[in-house]
Structure formats: structure tokens, C-alpha cells
Image: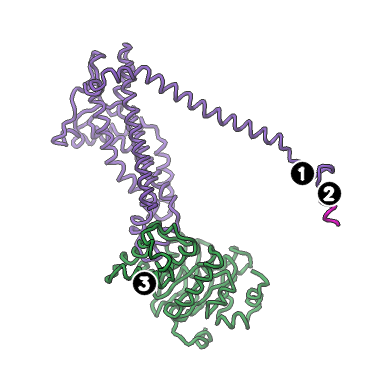
Chain colours: A purple, B green
């Protein structure tokens, strides 16, 4: 009987102790959803405007002289100027930066996450690597100017593509370390324990069980970091990358190539965009189109590699 | 503890003397004396946070991998001090295998899960043969023999756990440590694992942590009951209340705490 009485009390006829107030809560839902959607639209709008502007200005130049724009050197005459040397310079930088930054960054990430004891020193290093990732790139440029261009001149040859690669590697090293650690941290600890429990050493656990699972994450982080590197202008200007290069670094002997002066797409763009003639503005836009293509290709590679490694893992 | 030796007429494999374990400053387990007999199932029971798993993880030195874990006292494994500097934990873990609470197969093929520990430990014989033998020992062979190339994660939870047992058995351990191996499994899978443990206990020394008292009474010959000093889970230091044959612990406990626990009055 008492139970039935209680049920009666909770019917709308008598006042309940709960006031759901659904109408107002749903309104708050709506408001937040609209605000979030608006944020997305603003971001998209800005991006589309930028891309649209670049493509409208740059694409005619890019497509009209399709191979020749890519295959000629910069020139005083806008119509004859091309992006061969900056494009090749960017590719050199990309390869060198990757060669220096990927092994050291991934290695440091593995050490810090899998091997280092959780001491005060380790924590201090951890915090400072996080800080390094946030240091403005021009600071890296200043450091590199002193270390790679001046002190190491006998090796790097001064303002060379090698110095540029080292600079950019330094710049993205903290990003790669952080990405590697994140990827390693996402590997469940039970896998490590499974490995240790069957009598494997720490390196075997890392090599055979942890790294294969973390690899897609590491790859993605690394390629995104490389994408950031090839878009950088400030540190390269600081170390004295040239804006007018009418030759390519020789491939043989490779040391000559490494030590030759260079330019890169963002630098060439920066140079052209600061000129008054509209033809050069078009060239700058066309160079940006090429830079975007390189970036898109890299991101596509990242996605492809990630999917492929994940598939291998799931087989 | 002399009593224990008298009750079970077998050799002692593991002998624990005045063992205390700290996690940083926190005393997790204190003053444990215990002798584990050979080719028996020894069950560790007790409420959560009273140091059962901690003790288990001392036996294969998995606690070495836990930051801040410190072990005091002595554990002898067939006469050797487990924590002596010349004992190599990697080699030790081949002899003292472990099965975990949640099935944790490697995300590789079923075959590779078993073949990996065999290869890594330098097995000189026919790897394929030993893989089959291990899977048979773990009563899994008939279920997986046609899909050895499939990913181990495609198996059911109970099959995954038996795969983990097969993986532990593959490297021919002396002792098998099991940390609540059935707590993530349904009753049918649990029953299969219990059957398996009963088969294995004639060849291996098994130490099993369990929250399921019926399970302890069904499969073990020896039982150790642990409690923590404050009575609250995780708050105080764990200690060994009583250790004896399973029959004695469940039918004629000497401590009131044990009687309350095994009769289900708390815990």
C-alpha cells in the first residue's frame, strides 16, 4: 500500500522533488551547438578565403607554364622566373632534416619513455622538451647561425643546405620527441608486462611489441613535424639562406652538394611577395601552390603509411 | 611454518622470510613468512589491497619494473636468494611464468604468440612442435589448430586467457604465477581454466591469486589468507593472517578473521 502511495506522489498531479526543466536544458544544448558550429565555420571560411586567393592568383601562372615554371631558375624577369632551385632546395632540406631529426627524436622519445627512470632529472628534461617545442623558430635560427654557420663552418661550409637541414632538424626535434612519447604512452602496459613475463629484455619488449604498436602514431607525428619544417622561413633567413640561386647543389660529390648555398620555397615566396610588380605577386602565389602540393603529398603519405602499418598490425 | 611442511609432504620451492614490500614510503605488505610446496596449487585469498598480487609479483621480480618498489626480507627459490645480485630477472622469468588478470596476448597471430617466447629464449628443438604441444597443454589446440595465422585478439576472452597460459607454459617454467586469471571471464570460461589448472598441478607449481573463495576451495591444496591492517582496502599494510592446507583454512580456521572471511561474513 505504502508503495502505491509513493508512486502516486510522483505523478505530475502532485509536486515532485525533481524539476527536470528540460526546455531550458535543451535550449542550452542548442546554444552551445550553434556556437561550436559557428567556430568551425569561421575557421573554414578563413581557410577557404586564403586558399581561394592563392589559387586564383597563382594557379594561372602555375598551369600556363606548367613544366617551365617548375624547371627554371629565379630571374629578374617575372615571366621567366621559376622555382627549380627553391623546390630542389626544399627537397634537400626535407631529406636532411628527416635524416637528422627522425633517428635522434624517435630515439630520445624511446629512451625517455621506456628506459629512463622516473627521477627528478628525467622530469626536468621532460618539462624542458615541452618548453622547447614552444620556442619561436627565429630563436632556433639565431642559435643555428652561431653554431652551425659560424662555429661548424669547416664542416657545414657556412650558409649551406647542410646548415639549413641541421637548423630545421633542431627545430622539430622536440616535436618528434613529444609525438614519439605520446605514441609510446598509448601502448597498453599489459603488453609490456606480457613481454617481460616470458623472459624478454627491455629492448626486446620495445622492439618486438611496443614499437610496432606505436609506429603509426610515431609516423604521423614525424611527418606532421616535417611538414612544419618545410614551411619555416624565419630560421632559414636568419642563417642566411639566399633568395637568388641559379644552380643546384651538385649530387656528386655529395659533400659539395651539402656545403653549397641554397634557397627554399618559403624564402623564394617571401622574396617575391615583397616586390612591387604584380607579376612577381603571381609567382609568389604559384610558389605557394607548389608548397601546398608538397605538404599535401606529405600528409597523404602519412595517412597511407599509418593505414598500412595499422593493417599489418591487425593481420 | 614447520606445521605447513608437516601437513604437505612435498619439497618447498619458494620460501618467504620476513618479507616487506614498500611502494615509495607506503608499506604494502609486511612481515610475511611462507613456504610454497612443489607441484601444488597454492591460493592467495583476501580482500583487495592486502598485498596478494604484490607478493605474487615479487616471485618473478615483476616488481622490479614498478617505480619506487622496494623489497625487504628474503625469498628463496630452490635455495637461491631471488634478490641476490647474481640472479638475472630476465632468466628468472623464464623459470617463473606469469598469467595476468586481463588476458594480454600480443596483438600478433596465435602461432606467433607462442612461438615468440620460444624463439626469444633460444629453444634448440622444433619450434612448431613445441607450439602445438603448448597449445595442447593449455587445452586450446583443437579450437585454434585451423586458424593459427589469425590474430590472437580475434579469440574470445576465455580463449585468449588460455592462450596466455599456453604462452607461459611454452618456455617450460618451473612455477606458474596466476594473478586472478578468471576475474575477467564468464563462468563457463572460468570452469575451463579451473579444469586446466587441475590438470597442470601435477606437473607445475602454481600460485594463484583469487577473489573467488569457491575457486580457491575447488582448485587449491594450500591457501594463504591475507588482510590489511586497517581493514580498509588499500589503506594499510597487508599481512598474512593464516596459511595452511585449503581444507584446514576452509573447515577449521584458527583465526577469527579467517573464519569470518571464508564464511563470507566480510570481504
Q: Is residue B73 visible?
A: yes
- Label 1: element kind: loop
| Residue A77 image position (x, y, % from top left) | 24, 13
Alpha carbon separation for disc pair 3 and 2:
67 Å
Please name which of the two marks, 1 or 2, marks the residue nearer to the observer: 2
User: What residue is rendered at 45% in x and 54% in y?
Assistant: A188
Q: Is residue A86 magenta?
A: no
| Residue B198 image position (x, y, % from top left) | 49, 77
Figure disc tally: 3
User: What residue is rendered at 50% in x and 86% in y?
Assistant: B8
Please name which of the two marks, 3 or 1, marks the residue nearer to the observer: 3
- Label 2: element kind: helix
Q: Nearer the viewer, residue A268 or B197?
A: B197
| Residue corresponding to mark 3 | B133
Labelled disc at residue A8: 2
| Disc 1 chain ID | A
Amino acid at each position: 500500500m505504502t508503495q502505491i502511495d509513493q508512486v502516486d506522489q510522483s505523478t505530475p498531479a502532485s509536486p515532485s522533488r525533481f524539476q527536470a526543466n528540460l526546455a531550458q536544458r535543451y535550449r542550452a544544448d542548442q546554444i552551445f551547438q550553434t556556437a561550436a558550429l559557428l567556430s568551425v565555420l569561421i575557421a573554414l571560411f578563413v581557410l577557404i578565403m586564403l586558399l581561394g586567393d592563392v589559387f586564383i592568383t597563382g594557379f594561372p601562372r602555375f598551369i600556363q607554364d606548367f613544366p617551365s615554371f617548375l624547371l627554371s631558375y629565379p630571374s629578374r624577369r617575372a615571366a621567366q622566373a621559376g622555382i627549380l632551385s627553391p623546390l630542389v632546395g626544399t627537397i634537400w632540406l626535407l631529406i636532411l632534416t628527416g635524416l637528422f631529426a627522425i633517428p635522434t627524436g624517435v630515439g630520445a622519445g624511446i629512451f625517455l619513455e621506456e628506459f629512463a627512470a622516473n627521477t627528478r632529472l628525467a622530469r626536468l628534461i621532460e618539462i624542458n622538451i615541452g618548453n622547447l617545442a614552444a620556442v619561436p623558430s627565429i630563436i632556433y635560427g639565431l642559435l643555428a647561425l652561431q653554431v652551425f654557420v659560424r662555429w661548424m663552418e669547416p664542416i657545414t661550409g657556412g650558409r649551406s643546405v647542410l646548415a639549413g637541414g641541421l637548423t630545421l632538424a633542431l627545430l622539430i626535434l622536440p616535436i618528434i620527441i613529444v609525438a614519439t612519447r605520446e605514441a609510446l604512452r598509448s601502448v597498453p602496459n599489459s603488453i609490456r608486462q606480457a613481454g617481460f613475463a616470458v623472459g624478454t629484455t627491455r629492448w626486446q619488449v620495445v622492439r618486438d611489441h611496443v614499437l610496432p604498436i606505436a609506429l603509426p602514431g610515431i609516423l604521423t607525428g614525424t611527418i606532421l613535424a616535417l611538414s612544419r619544417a618545410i614551411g619555416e622561413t624565419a630560421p632559414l633567413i636568419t642563417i642566411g639562406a639566399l633568395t637568388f640561386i641559379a644552380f643546384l647543389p651538385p649530387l656528386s660529390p655529395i659533400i659539395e652538394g651539402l656545403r653549397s648555398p641554397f634557397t627554399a620555397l618559403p624564402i623564394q615566396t617571401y622574396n617575391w611577395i615583397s616586390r612591387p610588380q604584380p607579376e612577381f605577386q603571381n609567382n609568389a602565389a604559384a610558389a605557394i601552390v607548389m608548397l601546398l602540393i608538397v605538404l599535401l603529398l606529405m600528409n597523404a603519405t602519412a595517412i597511407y603509411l599509418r593505414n598500412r602499418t595499422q593493417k599489418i598490425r591487425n593481420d | 611454518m614447520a606445521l605447513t611442511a608437516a601437513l604437505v609432504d612435498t619439497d618447498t620451492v619458494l620460501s618467504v622470510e620476513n618479507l616487506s614490500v614498500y611502494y615509495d614510503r607506503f608499506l604494502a605488505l609486511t612481515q610475511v613468512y611462507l613456504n610454497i610446496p612443489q607441484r601444488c596449487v597454492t591460493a592467495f585469498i583476501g580482500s583487495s589491497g592486502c598485498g596478494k598480487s604484490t607478493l605474487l609479483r615479487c616471485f618473478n621480480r615483476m616488481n622490479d619494473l614498478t617505480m619506487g618498489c622496494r623489497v625487504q626480507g628474503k625469498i628463496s627459490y630452490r635455495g637461491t636468494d631471488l634478490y641476490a645480485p647474481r640472479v638475472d630477472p630476465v632468466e628468472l622469468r623464464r623459470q617463473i611464468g606469469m598469467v595476468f588478470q586481463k588476458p594480454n596476448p600480443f596483438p600478433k597471430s596465435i602461432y606467433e604468440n607462442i612461438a615468440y617466447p620460444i624463439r626469444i629464449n633460444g629453444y634448440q628443438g622444433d619450434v612448431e612442435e613445441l607450439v602445438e604441444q603448448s597449445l595442447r597443454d593449455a587445452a586450446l589446440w583443437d579450437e585454434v589448430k585451423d586458424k593459427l595465422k589469425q590474430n590472437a585478439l580475434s579469440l574470445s576472452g576465455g580463449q585468449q586467457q588460455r592462450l596466455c597460459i599456453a604462452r607461459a607454459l611454452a618456455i617450460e617454467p618451473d612455477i606458474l604465477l596466476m594473478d586472478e586469471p578468471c576475474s575477467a571471464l564468464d563462468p563457463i570460461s572460468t570452469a575451463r581454466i579451473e579444469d586446466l589448472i587441475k590438470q597442470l598441478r601435477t606437473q607445475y607449481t602454481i600460485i594463484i591469486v583469487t577473489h573467488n573463495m569457491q575457486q580457491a576451495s575447488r582448485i587449491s591444496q594450500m591457501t594463504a589468507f591475507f588482510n590489511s591492517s586497517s581493514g580498509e582496502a588499500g589503506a594499510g599494510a597487508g599481512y598474512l593472517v593464516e596459511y595452511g592446507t585449503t581444507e584446514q583454512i576452509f573447515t577449521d580456521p584458527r583465526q577469527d578473521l579467517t573464519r569470518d572471511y571464508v564464511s563470507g561474513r566480510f570481504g
